[in-house]
Structures are given as structure tokens and as C-alpha cells.
Amino acid sequence: MSAVLPADAIAPRPSRLVDEIRNAIRARHYSPRTEEAYVRWIRHFVRFHDRRHPRHLGEPEVTAFLSHLATERKVAASTQNQALSALLFLYRDVLRVELDWLDDVVRAKKPLRLPTVLTVGEVQAVMTHIRGVNWLVAGLLYGAGMRLMETVGLRTQDLDFERNEIVVRHGKGGKDRRTVLPTAMKRPLAAHLSRVRILHREDLLRGAGAVKLPGALARKAPGASREWAWQWVFPASRLYRDRETGEQRRHHHHESAVQRAVKEAVRCASIPKRATCHTLRHSFATHLLESGYDIRTIQELLGHSSLATTMIYTHVLNRGGGGVRSPLDGWG
């Protein structure tokens, strides 16, 4: 076990530690959302222990923090495990501290939860209460089985109208995949893209029209940020000025706007289920299974690494408990 520094040792400035965390995360090409989550949990951990530097903390402090999350804040098992992952990353990959007890920290056991699924009729009812860009996004969540951030982060080059497919880039786990472009969405999406293209041309005329590019592409191809192929399918309504480059850019449509629209639509449709944007993805998978599609095909469309993850949808098919016919239904 490595020696722990004395409590009176001079600790690095907090800002330096945060910079080290961000640099380590970006070197491993983790997603921006993972970066923000890890930084947030590490800050919570440091504040929980009166802003002492993590090098001065050990197993008792990590255990106390995780227990606090579970018993006092009553966070879900997945949330507690995310906090633990952030701390493991901090000690192993940032501070380079090899502590034996890290291998013995037990992750919270996630309870097996069946996903909430809407019927076809319920999906139709929800969609009738959504308008504009949010309707298009919701249509792809259900019609293509995409995650919310995958959908709002689509680029114009990711839509292939001739092949009826969508390329999902840098999905969960950094993986690319292909999924179906619903025929019913092609005409409204084409009309929407025509309006987006006009907006992009207007932005270019006023000296804007740039978007954030993935990875090092901005350095390799400086002009790509203004090319049509890299523009967001669902751009934000307002411009912003990037702090690093000074460019006037558009971000993509914010995911919270879609979340609010879907939540309000579920309420207006009087559906007594806790349905969210992700429920539309669950419904996509379940309805394909009900239609007789092969589960491995559905696995590929959803981008699941393990078939076991996709198998959960076999437990929520619209056929009663496990497809069993109740004996009560046999009474004549």
C-alpha cells in the first residue's frame, strides 16, 4: 500500500486538480457528459470531507461518502455506482495512487427493473400533443430507437434518405451504429432540413455558421465547422460565441426542451405511466419484438453490447405475464 501524505502537507490548488481530472478524461476520449459527472462527484467528495485533498483521504472516507449517498441522500444504486467510478478514476488514473482497498470496494447492487413501455395507441396519443422540432426528435426516439442525446446530436450527413438509415456516431461507449430512418419521418425531416439550410446560409452571411466539431477535426480541417455536412439536424434557435475560438456558433437543440415536451404530452394524454423520452426507445424495441423481428437485429439497432440487455424487452411484451393465458380467461 502506498504511503498516505500527512494532513499538513501542502496540497495542490483545487483548480489544478480539476484540470488534471479533465485532461485525464479527455486523453481517454470519454464523453463530455462523463467528464462533467466525474468532476461533479469528485467535487462533492472533497466538499463532504471539508475540502481536504483526496491524497489525504482513504478507505474510511470513501466508504463514508458512499454510505452518505445511500442512506441520507437516498440515491439510486446506479447513481452511487457512478460516484464510485468517479473516485476510482481519481485515485487510479489521476493521482496514480495504488491502494489495495480500491479493489475491495463493493458496488451497489442494481435492482432488476422492468422498463416502462407504452402501447402503440399510447405513443400515438403522446405524439399528438408534441409540436415542432420536439415532435421530430420524439419521432426518431420512437421510430428509430435512438437515445435522446444521440438524436439531438445528429449532423446532416448522418441522415441517408436513399438507404432509409441513420448513422449514430459516438453512441454509448463511443460506438457507431446504423439504425432505421422511418419512412413516415422522411418528408417532415426533409422539409425541416430545408429550413435549417436557409438558416445556415443566413448565419454564414452574418459571419457565423460554425458548429463544434468532434475530436481534433477542428485543427485538421479548420473550415469544416461551417460546412453543411457538419451542421446540426436540430440547431438551437440562438447563437453563442465560443470562448476558445471566438467563433459565433450554434449549439444543437437542448435536450431539456424535448424532455419537457414529452412529459407535458404524457400528462395531456392522461397516460398513468412514468413515461419519459427513454420510454419511447423502450417502446420501439418492444413493439419490434411484438412484430416478430429477431432479437439480435433489435440488439444491433439499439447498440447494445450484450444480448442480455436487449432480452429485458421479452419480459414486457404485450402478452400478459410471460405470454401465459390466465385460467380465469378459460371460464365460459
Image: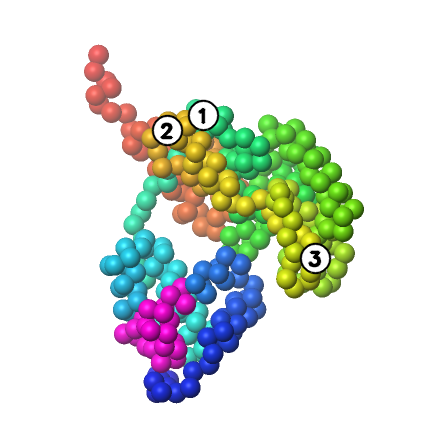
> Earlier along the polypeptide chain: callout 3 or callout 2?
3
Question: Label 1 amino acid?
Answer: Ala
**Residue hosting label 2:** 271
The x and y percentages for residue 212 are: 65, 55
Label 2, label 1: how far apart the Cα atoms are? 9 Å
Q: Please tell me which residue is depicted at 72% across the width and 49% down the height of the picture.
A: 209
Instruction: Tell me the tag on residue 247.
Output: 3
**Residue hosting label 1:** 125
> Earlier along the polypeptide chain: callout 3 or callout 1?
1
- The one of 101 and 247 positioned closer to us in this rendering: 247
The x and y percentages for residue 119 are: 41, 28
Magenta-highlighted stretch: main secondary structure? Answer: helix
Label 3, label 1: how far apart the Cα atoms are? 42 Å
Q: In this view, does 306 lie above or below 27?
A: above
Q: Do the residues labelled 2 and 1 touch (CB within 8 Å)?
A: yes
- Which residue range is magenta in the image? 41-62
Question: Label 2 amino acid?
Answer: Ile
Name the image quarter holding the N terminus: bottom left
**Disc 2 packing (10 Å; few <14; some 14–19; many ≥20):** some
Q: Quadrant of residue 192?
A: top right
User: Residue 6 vs residue 155: left or right?
Assistant: left
Q: Please tell me which residue is depicted at 69% across the width and 60% down the height of the picture.
A: 246
The x and y percentages for residue 53 are: 39, 78
The answer to whether residue 54 is magenta is yes
User: Residue 155 vs residue 41: left or right?
Assistant: right
Element marked by disc 3: loop
- The one of 177 and 276 positioned closer to us in this rendering: 276
Name the image quarter holding the C terminus: top left
Question: Label 3 amino acid?
Answer: Glu
